[in-house]
Amino acid sequence: MPAQPFPRISVRPSSAGSGVWCDDPVEAGRCVLEFDGVVRGIPARYSVQVGVDEHIHPDDAAVATQDRTRFQWRFLNHSCAPTCRVAGRGLVALRDLAAGEELTFDYNATEWSMSEPFTCTCGACGGSVVRGFAHLDAAARAQRSGWMAEHLVERMAHADA
C-alpha cells in the first residue's frame, strides 16, 4: 500500500475512446493506483503484465458490463511519451501531473509480447506498431530505459544468462 492515499482518478472520454484521468495534482514518483484483479500466466486484451509471468486481469463481469468503477486501470491508454510507468503492481507518475491530465503508460515498456498488437495513435511516435518489448530493437529498448518495468529487466537478465 502507498504511504499516502491514492489521488482521485476517473474514467472519462479520451482520444482513444476512454481513458484514466487524474482528478488531483500528482507529484512525480507518487503511486497513482494499484493494479488489482486475477493473476494469470498469459496476457489478454485487458491485462497488464506486472511480473515475468504475471498478468493482472479484471474479472469477466466488469469487462462484460463495461463497469467504469471497478478495475479502472483497464482504461489506461498507451503512449510512447507516457505520464506514468508500471512498477510492480503500481502505476507511478514519471513527472508532476496537473489535475485533469490523462494517465498513460508505454505498453512496450511493460508487456513482453502483446496478445493484441495495434498501431499507435499517441502522436509521439508517428504510428509505430505496439507489440511488446520482445519485438523492439536495441535503440527502442534503450529509449524506454527510464520507464521500463523491472520484470522486463529481470527477464532480459535471465535470457542473457
Image (cartoon, rainbow, N blue to C red):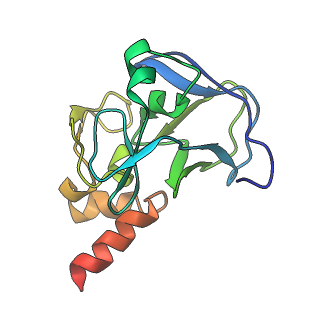
Residue 21 in percent (x, y) is at 61, 26
Q: Is residue 88 above or below residue 83?
A: below
Q: How many marks?
A: 0
Q: Is residue 126 above or below residue 159?
A: above
Is 42 placed left or right of 65 in the picture?
left
Q: Residue at x 23, y 81 (%)?
A: 160
Q: Residue at x 47, y 18 (%)?
A: 18
Q: Is residue 20 above or below residue 95?
A: above
User: Which of 126 and 77 lies nearest the eye of the viewer?
Assistant: 77
Residue 58 in percent (x, y) is at 44, 34
Instruction: Name the quarter where the C terminus is drawn.
Output: bottom left
User: Which of 41 and 14 lies nearest the eye of the viewer?
Assistant: 41
Q: Residue at x 76, y 30 (%)?
A: 24
User: In which image quadrant can residue 115 be found?
Assistant: top left
Q: Residue at x 56, y 26 (%)?
A: 70
Q: Is residue 104 above or below residue 49?
A: above
Is 60 placed left or right of 98 in the picture?
left
User: In which image quadrant can residue 101 be found?
Assistant: top right
Is 27 placed left or right of 138 in the picture?
right
Is 50 placed left or right of 12 in the picture?
left
User: Which of 70 and 154 lies nearest the eye of the viewer?
Assistant: 70
Residue 84 in percent (x, y) is at 55, 45
User: Which of 96 and 131 lies nearest the eye of the viewer?
Assistant: 131
User: In which image quadrant can residue 33 be found?
Assistant: top right
> Please, which residue is most extreme toward the bottom here?
161
Residue 153 in percent (x, y) is at 38, 70
